[in-house]
Amino acid sequence: MILPHTRRTAPVSPTRVRPNAVLLSPLLAVTALLVAILSGCAAGGTAPGATAGEGSGTPNGTITVYAAASLKATFTELAGTFEAENPGTRVSLSFAGSSDLASQISQGAPADVFASADTANMKKLQDAGLADGTPRNFATNTLAIAVPPGNPAGIASLKDLARPGIKLVTCARQVPCGAATAKVAETAGLTLSPVSEENAVTDVLGKVVSGEADAGLVYGTDIKTAGTKVSGIQFTEAGSAVNTYPIAGVAGSRNRAAAQAFLDLVTGAEGQKVLAAAGFGPPGQ
Amino acid sequence: MDTQAYSGIPGWVRALAVLAVVVVVLPLLAMVLRVDWAQFIPLVTSESSLTALGLSLRTSAASTLLCILLGVPLALVLARDTFRLQGLLRSLVLLPLVLPPVVGGIALLYTFGRQGLLGQTLDMLGLQIAFSTMAVVLAQTFVALPFLVVSLEGALRTSGSRYEAVAATLGARPGTVFRRVTLPLVLPGLASGAVLSFARSLGEFGATLTFAGSLQGVTRTLPLEIYLQRETDPDAAVALSLVLVAVAVAVVALAYRRPAAVRSGSGKRTTAPAPAPGNVQ
């Protein structure tokens, strides 16, 4: 394949009389192609009229909501509600770990709303001067034990997780669910020795769902989301590590009106109903 | 001959070539600029970092050995044998090259996991692979094997089977031909394949995270450690990334010295092959 090509270059090149034409046309073609592809992508992200909502009283246009991974089900539902209640709006959702999202926003990601799974990552945003107003707490979440269906290892309490031979999977201390795990274990006076410390609560759940782990420490809402694929076991010590979820607009948002309206929906009665149904606790304080 | 003096590369091709270099080098440079040099040594030599680096080197060495053990016979069969569905077999073996590693991890999970295809059998033998260092090695072997097979099959095809045929007509048995003729001929190709496999193993992330989990000293290799450190200490993540970049540079330098040796050593079939004994590391 390569050989005939290299041979062909020799006879072709003497005809290279107009270097400019040769230079420009392929470059232009490639550039045009790139522009076409990239603008196509962008059109999906920021729909036309993204700035239309600014100033006017009724929310309009597109907002981009960055939300913690654990909010996927509830925020997807609430986004649908929001779009239905405010014709002409579109909610673009991005779900990931809270610390990932916080660092993306501080690197200039075009978010209008940030909903974090803990106060620490919201504080990062506030410290960077990127939170629009004071964040509002809208939900809480506590840990629960997830076991595979049928509970093959016979786990009944937090204490059972420290039993030798139990394959326990938790979050790593560096992420919010892992910090909560450490706190709960400390409160209970237990030393847990997990076989794996994952980066995200979804990874913990995955290992329980696949039956590799005997038990995992996840959020109560994760167990609800997983449905019949896991069983949940509540424990009283979970109360010692309550994760609070704050939400705030992102400073510099191009669509403040719609962003604020979305915050109102989440913190209002309707949002609270959806969150409670998914297993979140009330915001408290 | 005249093609050597003639350089018929259009200007816009050169411009795009420069752009290509920028695309690759600029992000690496940007990362180097982010390194907190004052804290570099403490960050890189922290207990968790050293444990992760040690684990990475050990598992990558083990998986490279496995790749050689399994990859050499496979490359030989693919290069020398002719049988039905050979093309299909080759495509299948090369699949991990193009598969997202996470997919590999899921596949391994359903093979070697507790609930997997071989899980029950392995359990009866007292082997529990999930969450063990063995799982890391398996994941690395899965993704790295194609590199060795591709390099070696290429080397085998380039070297041709002429000397092997001559050796056989002189009465050498297949085992002797393999040891005395084939292996020495393709040693440079094998070495570069092994180095590439090692590099791929060292960088393995997705399959490991999915299949093996993440526990310090057992399954948390350097890429997993970087991913975790990033959550709380971006400086540490950058410092550790630089360590991996340094290793990668060394590996690439090693691997790309070898193919040249293959070509010059066995490209001209009229001269004696002289399989340079000094090529063994």
Image (tube, coloured by chain):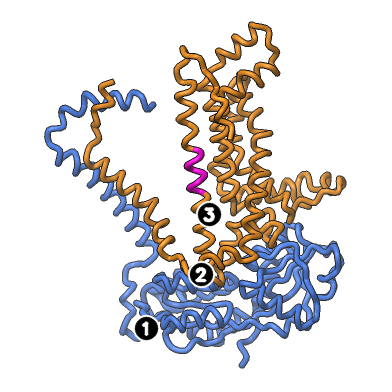
Q: Nearer the viewer, mark 2 or mark 1?
A: 2
From this viewpoint, which residue is outermost toward the front? B278
Left or right: residue B17 compared with residue A75: left
Instruction: Point out which mark residue B39 bears.
Output: 2
From this viewpoint, which residue is outermost toward the left? A17
Residue contact at pointers 3 and 2, CB within 8 angstroms = no
Q: Quadrant of residue A96?
A: bottom right
Give the x, y percent position of residue B86.
60, 25
Left or right: residue B49 compared with residue B248: right
Cα separation, mark 3 vs mark 1, equals 52 Å
In the picture, which quadrant includes the N terminus of chain A?
top left
What chain does mark 2 sit on? B
Dot 2: element: helix
Q: Quadrant of residue A27?
A: top left
Q: Which chain is blue?
A: A
From the image, tell me which residue sits under label 3. B244
Tell which of B171 and A137 is nearer to you: B171
Residue contact at pointers 2 and 1, CB within 8 angstroms = no
Q: Chain B's colour?
A: orange
Dot 3: element: helix
Magenta span: chief secondary structure: helix
* Magenta-colored stretch includes residue A42: no
Instruction: Point out which mark residue A58 bears.
Output: 1
Give the x, y percent position of residue A245.
58, 81
Cα separation, mark 2 vs mark 1, equals 51 Å
Query: From which residue to which does the magenta span run?
Result: B248-255
What chain does mark 1 sit on? A
Cα separation, mark 3 vs mark 2, equals 17 Å
